[in-house]
């Protein structure tokens, strides 16, 4: 029989044995707090220690054969919980609560492995789609999501994940066909939307005002789409299902924008000087030069991002005139920055514009305090989803610390030239995930799937990762293998699960 030592680091084994032997003499029984502590009996401690470890070993390793994930899915009961047949007595004690060295043993318990097995299945599960009805404006930010963030409301969690998946669809569509024709207008593009109740109505392109020297093509002719000035950046979609419109309380228009992918988009990200907004009479309102360039520049055969979005939203507003509408702009990384500029543009594109909300994932700073005030004055609601370990959310701007940064914003110079964030913040932390390494690298902390994983498990800032998280871990393991704890990678292999490399590249 395999011993319990195989589930614990060797350097902690001795400490584990010692503490376990002395445990029942030093603490009151967790099952009978009124019991008096027993006198220490060192003569039999070794034998008792062996007996306890043997019992725990039998309990933790009672599932040793590879498990068919299909069989596991079939075992899910009607209410969505796994069957608990044969659960051992000690398993319910939550040993990790009693001493630190037992955490690894708890993570390998049958209960925990059953949950891992479910999350590693290919079947996607979602939080319930409750009827938003009369409260949809709250979930769309009319009260700046007051009382919904910490703890995180289950309906808002579902909405945040849903809008994040619209961005994933944009990434997938771009990387499946990244090239943009140079000599002619691009053909219509198909996007596999994650929500079957929506239909895509417009492709969006971002064009850089920069250009690479001609010698770049001679030196590296195989770069292809990486050097193109205009690239497909996202799409407009609208809810087209009567039952879903009734559930949500309105017809929703979504603008989804991906993050950085091409060389020129990276170059624009680095143009961090603040510039005035065109056609604006207030010189105190400034935004990042590179983001504004991608937003306002037209291509040879495609309109600018600003023109395309405004034109399509006006068309949809006219088409569905008289209905209750909402506009939701969602983006990741560069897409999150552009989402703010798009929302700012839409807020003044017509006399009566539907409520506008921005769901931003891992977004950088876009403008100065004057721009933040401009967004607020237009009643654009912004929910920033931020990972505490994501460095992209701290740029552009100098790393001077939050206190120094706040002090500088209150000065006359800071109000004009300091970068600041906009909107309400939902702050996540990679270290709260039981599956990701606490020292996950920069790319993982900025990855969109990692963001959605953290949102799905977030309960509150002072609570651990929720035990009933529903999002599948398959994509996370495929995209972030080196950042997932080895315990789970090895366990996934032993469960005979397929790790097909159907990863979708996601960058900047």
Image (cartoon, helix red, strand yellow):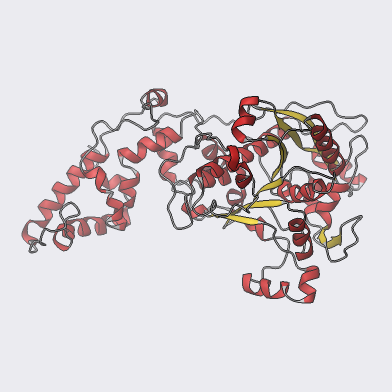
Which residue is nearer to you in this view: 219 or 70?
70
Q: Relative to residue 433, is residue 245 depicted above or below?
A: above
Quarter of the image containing the N terminus?
Answer: top left
Q: Relative to residue 422, is residue 450 depicted above or below?
A: above
Q: In the rendering, at what x and y percent does residue 420 appear?
A: 71, 63
Q: Is residue 266 left or right of residue 296?
A: left
Give the quarter of the image for residue 408: bottom right
Q: How many marks?
A: 0
Which residue is nearer to you in this view: 76 or 252?
252
Q: Is residue 144 left or right of residue 378?
A: left
Residue 56 visible? The answer is: yes
Residue plotted at (70% across, 58% down) = 422
Q: In the rendering, at what x and y percent does residue 391 appear?
A: 63, 58
Residue 220 visible? The answer is: no
Which residue is nearer to you in this view: 251 or 154?
251
Q: In the rendering, at what x and y percent does residue 469 appear?
A: 45, 41
Residue plotted at (45% across, 29% down) = 497
Q: Is residue 394 left or right of residue 388?
A: right
Residue plotted at (82% across, 48% down) = 345
Residue plotted at (33% across, 51% down) = 103
Which residue is nearer to you in this view: 33 or 184?
33
Q: In the rendering, at what x and y percent does residue 372 appear?
A: 74, 60
């Amino acid at each position: 029989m395999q011993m319990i030592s195989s589930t614990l680091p060797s350097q902690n084994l001795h400490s584990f044995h010692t503490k376990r032997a002395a445990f029942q003499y030093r603490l009151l029984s967790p099952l009978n707090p009124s019991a008096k502590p027993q006198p220490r009996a060192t003569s039999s401690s070794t034998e008792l220690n062996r007996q306890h470890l043997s019992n725990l070993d039998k309990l933790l390793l009672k599932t040793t054969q590879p498990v068919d994930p299909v069989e596991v899915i079939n075992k899910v009961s009607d209410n969505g919980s796994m069957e608990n047949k044969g659960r051992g007595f000690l398993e319910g004690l939550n040993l990790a609560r009693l001493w630190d060295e037992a955490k690894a043993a708890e993570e390998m318990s049958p209960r925990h492995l059953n949950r891992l097995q479910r999350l590693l299945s290919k079947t996607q599960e979602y939080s319930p789609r409750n009827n938003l009805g009369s409260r949809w404006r709250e979930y769309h930010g009319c009260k700046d999501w007051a009382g919904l963030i910490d703890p995180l409301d289950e309906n808002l969690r579902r909405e945040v994940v849903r809008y994040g998946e619209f961005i994933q669809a944009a990434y997938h569509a771009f990387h499946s066909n990244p090239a943009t024709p140079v000599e002619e207008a691009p053909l219509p593009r198909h996007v596999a939307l994650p929500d079957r109740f929506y239909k895509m109505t417009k492709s969006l392109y971002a064009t850089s005002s920069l250009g690479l020297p001609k010698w770049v093509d001679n030196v590296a002719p195989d770069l292809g789409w990486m050097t193109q000035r205009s690239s497909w950046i996202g799409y407009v979609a609208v809810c087209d299902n009567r039952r879903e419109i009734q559930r949500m309380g309105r017809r929703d228009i979504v603008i989804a924008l991906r993050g950085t992918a091409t060389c020129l988009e990276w170059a624009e990200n680095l143009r961090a000087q603040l510039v005035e907004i065109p056609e604006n009479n207030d010189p105190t309102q400034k935004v990042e030069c590179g983001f504004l360039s991608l937003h306002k520049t037209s291509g040879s055969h495609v309109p600018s991002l600003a023109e395309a979005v405004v034109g399509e939203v006006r068309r949809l507003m006219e088409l569905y005139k008289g209905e209750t509408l909402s506009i939701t702009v969602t983006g990741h990384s560069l897409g999150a920055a552009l989402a703010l500029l798009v929302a700012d543009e839409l807020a003044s594109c017509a006399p009566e514009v539907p409520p506008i909300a921005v769901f931003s994932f891992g977004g950088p700073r876009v403008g100065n305090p004057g721009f933040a005030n401009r967004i607020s004055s237009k009643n654009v609601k912004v929910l920033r989803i931020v990972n505490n370990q994501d460095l992209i959310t701290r740029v552009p701007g100098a790393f001077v610390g939050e206190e120094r940064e706040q002090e500088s914003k209150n000065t006359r110079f800071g109000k004009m030239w300091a970068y600041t964030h906009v909107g309400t913040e939902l702050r996540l932390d990679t270290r709260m995930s039981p599956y990701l390494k606490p020292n996950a690298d920069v790319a993982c902390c900025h990855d969109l799937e990692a963001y959605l994983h953290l949102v799905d498990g977030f309960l509150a800032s002072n609570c651990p990762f929720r035990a009933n998280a529903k999002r599948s871990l398959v994509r996370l393991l495929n995209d972030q293998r080196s950042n997932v704890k080895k315990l789970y990678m090895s366990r996934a292999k032993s469960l005979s699960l397929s790790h097909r490399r159907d990863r979708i590249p996601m960058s900047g």
